[in-house]
Image: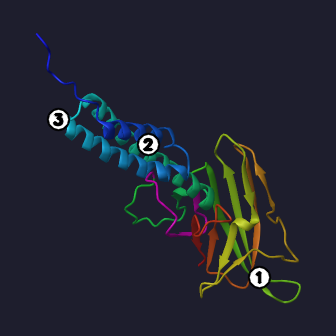
């Protein structure tokens, strides 16, 4: 008996969707390029769904291929979003530096209801002199002492601030006197500056794992706050201390 059954051709749009999905998946981890990969995967998914519909209606063969194309494109979209989130976090860390993860308030009041063991974010609060801040890279910084009323060689009023770095990580970390800024009562920020009578002045360098370094940074005029920036490109300080 002659077989009159006509074999349906495979869905061309499902094949196109699969090809786009594979290309998108292969390029999903490449920075910048994966922006194109994202839209390529979306187009591929639409084509694959259209191909699946045509297969279910009996117009084309290749149902399994269409389903595979849909899966590949969904995985590509997820890979692009995941990689972009990872790159965004890496860029943020590089630009803004390590963030404060815990602070220690040495002069907390007795009626404070918070637990001593509870981590406290210090990015948006003003700490008291004597408090230390632990950063996400393992460095701990603190403002230990403030000496106002100093006078520079030209008669300019100066304020001295003694700070400490402690490296609690397992790798070498850097420190710099220009990590610190002084802020006046009217909100003007200034870098540390030369003081003719400086003693134990903080410089810059690398601190080995487990190491500690202390020193003074000096600011012109009276300051109401001391700000620590964990990166020279940071748009806001990692921690702020209020000067009484």
Q: Quadrant of residue 154?
A: bottom right
Where the N terminus falls, by quadrant? top left
Question: Dot 3 surroundings within 10 Å: few (below 14), some, or many (20 or more)?
Answer: few
**Distance of label 3 from label 1 (alpha carbons):** 81 Å
Residue carrying label 3: 56
Q: Nearer the viewer, residue 231 or 52?
A: 52
Relative placement, left or right, of 124 versus 52 is right
Indicate yes or no whether the magenta region holds residue 232.
Answer: no
In front: mark 3 or mark 1?
Answer: 3
Q: Which residue is mark 1?
A: 158
- In terms of depth relative to the viewer, which is nearer, 152 or 76? 76
Visible in this render: residue 85?
A: no
Q: Secondary structure at mark 1?
A: strand
Please give left or right for residue 206 compared with residue 52 in the image. Answer: right
Residue 131 in percent (x, y) is at 58, 63
Q: Are marks 2 and 3 in contact (CB under 8 Å)?
A: no
Of marks 2 and 3, which one's residue comes earlier in the chain? Answer: 3
Label 2 and label 1: CA atoms lie apart by: 54 Å
* Residue at 54%, 50% in the rendered image: 33
Residue carrying label 2: 79
In the picture, the disc for residue 119 is none
Residue at 62 percent across and 60 percent down: it is 95
In the picture, the quarter occupied by the C terminus is bottom right
């Amino acid at each position: 008996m002659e077989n009159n059954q006509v074999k349906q051709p495979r869905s061309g749009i499902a094949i196109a969707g699969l090809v786009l999905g594979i290309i998108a998946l292969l390029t999903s981890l490449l920075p910048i390029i994966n922006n194109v990969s994202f839209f390529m995967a979306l187009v591929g998914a639409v084509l694959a769904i259209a191909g699946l519909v045509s297969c279910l209606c009996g117009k084309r063969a290749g149902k399994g291929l269409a389903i595979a194309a849909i899966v590949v494109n969904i995985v590509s979209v997820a890979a692009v979003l995941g990689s972009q989130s990872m790159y965004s976090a890496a860029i943020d860390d590089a630009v803004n530096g390590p963030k404060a993860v815990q602070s220690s308030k040495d002069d907390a009041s007795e009626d404070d209801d918070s637990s001593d063991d509870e981590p406290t974010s210090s990015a948006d609060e003003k700490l008291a002199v004597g408090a230390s801040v632990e950063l996400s890279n393992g460095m701990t910084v603190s403002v230990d002492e403030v000496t106002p009323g100093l006078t520079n060689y030209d008669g300019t009023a100066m304020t001295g601030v003694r700070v400490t770095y402690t490296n609690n990580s397992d790798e070498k970390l850097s420190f710099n006197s220009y990590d610190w800024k002084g802020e006046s009562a009217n909100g003007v920020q200034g870098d540390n500056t030369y003081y003719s009578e400086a003693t134990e002045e903080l410089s810059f360098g690398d601190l080995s794992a487990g190491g500690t370094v202390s020193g003074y940074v000096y600011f012109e005029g009276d300051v109401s706050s001391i700000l620590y920036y964990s990166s020279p490109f940071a748009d806001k300080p990692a921690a702020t201390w209020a000067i009484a």
